Amino acid sequence: MPVLSEVIAALDALWPPERAEQWDAVGTVCGDPDAPVGRVLFAVDPVQEVVDEAVELGADLLVTHHPLYLRGTTTVAASTFKGRVVHTLIKNDIALHVAHTNADRADPGVSDALAGALDLRVTGPLVPDPSDSAGRRGLGRICEVEPPLTLAEFAARAAERLPATAQGIRVAGDPERIIRTVAVCGGSGDSLFDEVRAAGVDAYVTADLRHHPASEAQHHSPLALVDAAHWATEWPWIEQAAAQLDEISDRHGWGLRTHISRTVTDPWTAHAASSASSSHH
Ligand SMILES: [Zn+2]
């Protein structure tokens, strides 16, 4: 059975921490480097429900996409919700490791997993990483839809393939428009509209789109928008990440057992459709 430091070294090779954004907080949050690791749980959010799931599973390591602490703290008292998470982890000998923007930019990264879930063929990054001569790493992905679909069909595919959330899928654009090329960005993507427009794609799939950037994008060009729950756009990455660790484990004969959390940790828990149907006029 490998020890934590060996497993972390393998994860750092997949998602080198130095490739994270400056403001990010990636890496190991808690855990003993010499502790044996037999079972690993992957999840998007390091929240109490997920940590409780790790305890129940008997996991030795929890790998999450989102950081527990993005900024410094002066307390891990169990009276705070993040402190409660830290207490639960340490009391149960569970390490926590975070791969966030370093996983976004990786090859394969978070947006490759999103593209894969939607059955899209990736042609390259939306914002290429200048340090990657192969031109594969970077933020977001540009993809082809083969065969092309209408926007309505494409949105239905997203609703079917991404894990279910209260939000579901929000769509902007003519439902009959043919979608041949798509930009995807797992997580909050509304800072990338300039790059999406420059890519000249038919549609953009991301999360957390706000009124003004979405409205402006629509007035610039006939770009269709497909907005899913933030958690749902990043969830396919945990399946991909677990498969990557499985492969490493097989290669080393580690015999790790990997699990993916299906707990929906999107903060939105209900969706009330407006009573007057505005979509059928
Ligand atoms: Zn995110």
Image (cartoon, rainbow, N blue to C red):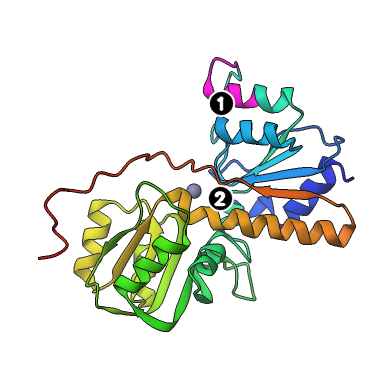
**Relative height, residue 188 to residue 158 (above, below):** above
Identify the image quadrant of residue 263.
top right
Which residue: 81% across, 50% down? 256
Can residue 79 be found in the magenta stretch? yes
Q: Is residue 126 left or right of residue 27?
A: left
Amino acid, disc 2: Glu
Identify the image quadrant of residue 170.
bottom left
Which residue: 49% across, 74% down? 120
Q: What residue did someone put label 1 on? A: 82
Range of residues picked out in magenta: 77-86
| Residue 201 pos. (x, y %) | 36, 76
Q: Secondary structure at mark 2?
A: loop
In the picture, which quadrant includes the N terminus?
top right
Q: Is residue 25 left or right of residue 4?
A: left
**Relative height, residue 166 to residue 186 (above, below):** above
Which residue: 26% across, 78% down? 177
Earlier-in-chain disc, 2 versus 1: 2
- Density class for disc 2 (Cα within 10 Å; few <14, some 14-19, many ≥20) is some
Can residue 30 be found in the magenta stretch? no
| Residue 273 pos. (x, y %) | 22, 48
For residue 265, say whether it is visible. Answer: yes
* Residue contact at pointers 2 and 1, CB within 8 angstroms: no
The dominant secondary structure in magenta is helix
Kindly identify which numbered label has been placed on residue 21.
2
